[in-house]
Image: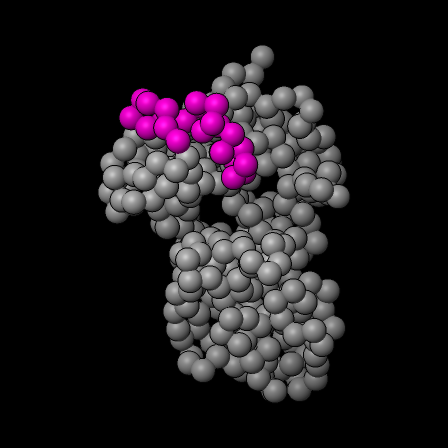
């Protein structure tokens, strides 16, 4: 029988004034949904310095937070499926997958099968023993369905917590390649623009003055005709759709992005031109710095080759 999982962390002194629920989302948001976190707080499964508190509690910094996650129920089980995966690296603690565009990371409405979670449960059955959100077991961070590239998979709970903490501490290096519709005004730059749900369309994200901190750094790699530009982006935070939102906000939307980009696309591309090219982490067991790279998919490389040849 599965037993509850305890997640613990200490609040950063710099987080003074932050709400309890937002701090927990920041630490374990890749393992639990916002709704689940709110429920855990209401049911007394979250303590601050060993005392249950309300979600609205304003923290002073330095508090010890403990989150008790009940074992998953049977109705949220995910069926393992044998799906070919491009494994870049693996050991007893984690695996690194080169995710193809079009592969959904975890099950959800309309996508209960054929996801990365289905695939890793078949390849690494021990992941099913982890007491995290069943439909996101093993998923340390996420990539959009149509974004390809490097993604981490944790094989056990201690590794999951250590890797997630690295993302929270911003010690992870994340580099992306994207082709944008217009050339940025500077060859390098930093975009520091908070992101939250778009109040006019809850399915989209947008830059909001009171949103969650979001920082992206970019450098132009190559210029093509009509403003098309290959850009490398370094993420210092990990907000939903961050690169797509930031580049569109800057007036340089990602090619193929029909949500945040132009309605009429100049290049016939299914999904956006966005690739997670490189990821660097500290090994959760040894502390050794490791970097993993995924080559640009053939369909995206073909577009660059055609642009370099003067065609579209």
Give the x, y percent position of residue 296. 60, 63
Where in the figure is residue 3, as x and y percent of width and height?
52, 16
Q: Residue at x 41, y 58 (%)?
A: 210
Q: Is residue 262 visible?
A: yes
207 on left or right of 57? right
Image quadrant assignment for residue 50:
top left
As drawn, which residue projects farthest toward the top? 1
Asked which quadrant contains residue 67, the reply is top left
The residue lying at 63 percent from left, 54 percent from top is 203
In the figure, 24 relative to 221: above or below? above
Q: Is residue 157 above or below residue 33?
A: above
The mark tally for this picture is 0
Q: Residue at image x 49%, y 74%?
A: 250
Q: Is residue 156 visible?
A: no
Q: Is residue 246 left or right of residue 295?
A: left
| Quadrant of the rendering where the C terminus is positioned | bottom right
Residue sitting at x 53%, y 76%: 251
Magenta region includes residue 40? yes
Which quarter shows the N terminus? Answer: top right
Q: Residue 147: where, in percent of width, then height?
A: 62, 57
Which one is in front, 210 or 311? 210
Q: Is residue 46 magenta?
A: yes
- Left or right side of 185 for 16: left
Residue 138's spot in the image, x, y percent?
A: 55, 35
Q: Nearer the viewer, residue 312 or 240?
A: 240
Q: What color scheme is it?
A: one colour
Residue interval drawn in magenta: 32-54
């Amino acid at each position: 029988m599965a037993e509850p999982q305890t997640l613990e962390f200490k609040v950063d002194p710099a987080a003074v004034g932050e709400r309890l629920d937002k701090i927990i989302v920041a630490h374990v948001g890749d393992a639990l949904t916002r709704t689940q976190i709110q429920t855990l707080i209401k049911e007394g499964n979250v303590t601050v310095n060993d005392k249950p508190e309300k979600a609205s509690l304003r923290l002073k910094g330095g508090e010890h937070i403990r989150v008790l996650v009940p074992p998953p129920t049977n109705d949220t089980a995910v069926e393992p499926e044998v799906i070919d995966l491009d494994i870049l690296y693996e050991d007893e603690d984690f695996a690194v997958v080169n995710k193809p565009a079009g592969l959904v990371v975890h099950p959800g409405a309309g996508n209960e099968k054929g996801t990365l979670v289905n695939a890793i449960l078949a390849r690494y059955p021990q992941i099913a023993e982890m007491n995290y959100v069943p439909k996101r077991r093993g998923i340390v961070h996420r990539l959009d369905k149509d974004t390809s590239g490097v993604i981490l998979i944790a094989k056990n709970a201690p590794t999951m917590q250590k890797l997630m903490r690295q993302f929270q501490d911003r010690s992870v290096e994340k580099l992306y390649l994207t082709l944008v519709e217009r050339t940025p005004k500077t060859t390098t730059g930093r975009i520091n623009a908070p992101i939250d749900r778009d109040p006019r369309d809850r399915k989209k994200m947008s830059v909001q003055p009171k949103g969650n901190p979001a920082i992206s750094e970019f450098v132009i790699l190559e210029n093509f005709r009509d403003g098309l530009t290959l850009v490398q982006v370094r993420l210092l935070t990990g907000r939903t759709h961050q690169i797509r939102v930031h580049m569109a906000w800057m007036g340089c939307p990602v090619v193929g992005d029909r949500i945040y980009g132009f309605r009429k696309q100049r290049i016939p591309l299914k999904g956006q031109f966005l690739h997670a090219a490189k990821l660097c982490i500290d090994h959760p067991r040894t502390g050794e710095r490791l970097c993993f790279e995924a080559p640009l998919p053939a369909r995206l490389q073909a577009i660059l080759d055609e642009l370099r040849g003067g065609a579209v």
